[in-house]
Structure formats: C-alpha cells, structure tokens
Image (cartoon, rainbow, N blue to C red):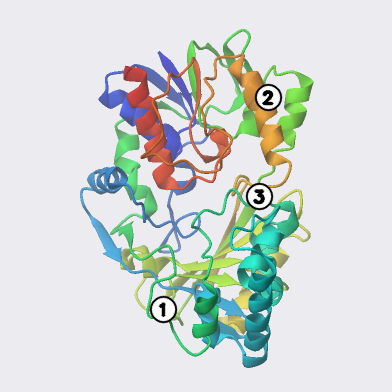
Amino acid sequence: MYTILGAGLAGLSTAHHLQQKGIAFRIFEAKAHGGGHVHSEERDGFIWDEGPHVSFTKYAYVREYFAANCNQAYQEFAPVPSNYASGNWIPHPAQANMYAVPEALREACIADVKVARSRQPKNFIANNYQEWIDYAFGETFAEKFAGVYTRKYWTTDPENLTTDWIGKRIYFPELSDMTDSASGPLEKQTHYISSVRYPQEGGYYSYIRDVESQLNITYNHKLTAISFERKEIIFEHGAHISFDKLISTLPLPLLIGCSDAPLPVKAAAKQLRCSSVLIINVVANHPAKVDAHWIYVYDEAFYSTRINFTELLSASNGITGQTGIQVEVYFSDYHPVNHQVEMIEKEVIRELIIMGLIADQESVSSYHSKWVDWANVIFDILRKEAQETVFKWLATQGLAREDDDLEPMTEWDTKPIWQPGSLMLAGRFAQWKYYWTDDCVMRARYIADNLEK
C-alpha cells in the first residue's frame, strides 16, 4: 500500500496512474479540495486560475492525457504575450523586438550587446545569472529589462541565481536578432511558446477535475509531524497513521521541517528558498483593453509583475462586456511583504489604470486577493548544496537517488529506468524542480511505470 501526501496535480496524477495499474494506494490532502496550484475558483462571475496556466507541452502523452480528462473539450490557439515598460508596449520577447523600445534606449542596448559578444568567446560559461544576461543581452538591456524582472519575479538579484534553470525558457538571441529587430519585427518565431491548449470550460482545473472525482481522497488532513524512523504520520486534528511506502508531493522544506530529520538536515532544508505570490483578481466593467493573454511588467516601482486576462484564455471564464484581470506580486525571504495587503491591492489597481488596462477607478466592479505560500523554487547559489544534504539523508530513509535529482529540469524522453525505494518524491516543490504541469504528469507516469519493473 502506497501512501500519497498531497492531492495537487502531481499527487492526483500519481494516484491515477497507480489506479490504472491496479496498485493500491491511499491519498491525503490538507485542503477540502484537490488540484493544488491548478485548482480553479469561480468568483464574481469569473473563473480564476492561480496565474496564467496554459498547456504547451512537447510530450504527446500529456496532450492526450489532458485532452482525455476534459473529454476533448479544449481550445488551441497561438498565445499573445506582451511586455510593459515605462509606458511602452513591447512584443515578447523584448530582446527580439527592439523596434518597440524607445530609440535612445534601443541604441544603447544594441551598442552594449555588440561589446558584450565581442568580449567573450562563443563558448563562454557564466558563473551566475547576472553574467549570463550581461553576455546574452548587453549590460543596458540586462539592467533595464532582465535585471528588473529578475528582482520582481525571482525576488532576488541576478548574481544570486545560478544558470542551470534557464534551458530554453529565456530566449538567447543571436546578435543579429537584436540588431535586425531594431528596424522591425523579425520573420521568425523567437518565443518558446507557439501554440497552447486550454479547457473550454471550468478553467485549467478541468484538465484534472474528473480524475479527482474518481479517487478516494481523504481531505482536510494537514501534516503536522512525520517520523521516518517509526514510519508514522500525524495530522493536524490528531489522527495518526503508519506507512510502509510513501510518495510525498509536499514542499521539501515543509516535509523535512516537521520530520525527525537531524538538525543539520533541517537547517539545510531551511536554505531552500521559494517565492510566495499575492494574486490580485480585478473585474472591470468593460472589455479587455489589449489582446495580450499575459503581460510582463518591467517597471521596478510597480508591484504588478505578471498580468493575465482570464476571459482571453476562454470566453467561458468571464462575463461578456467585462474583463477579469489577474495580477501577480511576488515575495520571499529575500523580498518580504512590505505593506498591508489592502494597500497593495489599491496600488495594483492604480497601476492597472496607469497602464491603461482599466479605464478608471469607477470601472472596477470588484476585486479580491489570494495568498499562495509556494510559488516558485528559487535557484540561488546555495540551493544545490542544501538540496544534496537533504537528499543524502532521505536516501537513508528509503529515497532512491536519481542521476538528475539535483537538476532543475528533467528530460523525460531520455530519463533512464529507475528502481524506486520505499520513499518517492513527486512534483515541483517535493523534488525542488523547475517543473511545469506536464512534468508533474510525466513524473506520475514515470513512477508508475518503474514500479512495475
């Protein structure tokens, strides 16, 4: 019998894959519902996801899995992301759309990137993210765009981040991309997302809702203590259970923090940094003022970091003639909350008016906010060593190490066969990875497939 902690996407998908193979399990969830970060909520006539969730996976298995789960009721379209910087709208990615950058700044960016590329060999390896963006974009673009967004989204300075998480998620332009795009749009696609899928109804949660309904989940069971030595779990209301084989989807610092791990291991777990996000959902009584599905905000003085329009992802998410604007504001130990939520909400609405996304204050029909403790793993300089300390100890408790368990991302097409132990981890925060929703599904499949062998 496998005990699964957490009924987010990773937990639900893992349970579903085990169920399909006839493997016995039980699953516990702290909240009154499952879905985790992909849970969608309805309020004020709009469907709200936790951020702009869209599926653009390269894995056919995940496309088919999601499509089957929503009874093929999805839509597919080319997304339109955009950038806002000091009153200027710039197509995404900005480094390949330099024509939309103000002339003086554009000229400085082009001059700097030429210097940056001439200083270093083509096989240049950066020691940190600051060195990477200076080389990739030149110092001016790095300062005015990439550095600003890094401090807002990752909540720390670029020099405090490694580069192993980048992959293809940030476009590294050829020098000609920046110089040629100064005259007008490039003919080629430079954003890593060219097509996305999104459920027709019910928000992103529709990709897993039916799966949840088919599982026997024990809700309202929040973990308060776990003993790996005694193989015992204690929940908030006092219930005790014993386990033999455990699959945890809980955040690694949380799991270790309430366990009987040695103090040095707990100290290492505390070094694993993660951002939190305040999501502010605003309804305005007019249609969306732009056609961008989501927007990156490069103004450092603005709280608003990333913005999306829920009804532009699916018309069924909203009310005709109105717009549902969702704004993300990020915090962490590196960048703590500095004001009351009510003040931040009002300031964000003011920013939306400045950006022209809301006509005026009187246009706001309603707004509300949601705090999410676990937003993004921060791949800072201390992360890998701290994670190794935690995994090394967990290996003494039944965790079977994997060749890529310290790497931010996983290549599922080439990942070798693995012999699981009595303890397994699944999902972004449990494995401390830069995982997207398709990775959670592929992890579930990988666990179930390897349990057969």
User: Quick check: marks 3 and 1 in contact, CB under 8 Å?
Assistant: no
Q: Residues within 10 Å of mark 2 (few under 14, many from 20)?
A: some
Quadrant location of the C terminus in the rendered image = top left
**Residue 332, position as x, y percentages in the image:** 71, 50
Mark 1 touches mark 2? (CB < 8 Å): no
Is residue 80 placed above or below 226 in the rendered structure? below
Q: Nearer the viewer, residue 24 or 378?
A: 378
SS class, disc 2: loop
Residue located farthest toward the front when viewing the structure as drawn: 121
Residue that extends furthest to the top in the rendered view of this protein: 230
The answer to whether any part of residue 303 appears in the image is no
Q: Which residue is mark 1?
A: 291
First reached walking from the N terminus: tag 1 or tag 2: 2
Give the camera-side residue of 179 and 32: 179
Task: Describe the element under mark 3 as helix, strand or loop.
Answer: loop
Q: Would you say the residues marked 3 and 2 are in contact, meaning their CB atoms lie under 8 Å apart?
A: no
Q: Residues within 10 Å of mark 3 (few under 14, many from 20)?
A: many
Q: Which residue is mark 2?
A: 258
Mark in the foreground, 3 or 2: 3
Residue occupying the point 47% across, 29% down: 219
Q: CA distance from mark 3 to mark 1?
A: 29 Å
Residue 285 is situated, as x and y percent measured from the top left of the image, at: 46, 78
Q: Is residue 84 left or right of residue 319?
A: right
The residue to which callout 3 is attached is 275
Q: Which residue: 44% across, 75% down?
A: 292
> Camera-side residue: 388 or 365?
388
What is the distance, in whole Å, between disc 1 and disc 2 at their CAs? 46 Å
Callout 1: SS: loop
Mark found first going from the N terminus, 3 or 2: 2
Amino acid carrying mark 3 in the image: Ser
Name which residue type carries label 2. Answer: Cys
Q: Which numbered circle lies on residue 157?
A: none
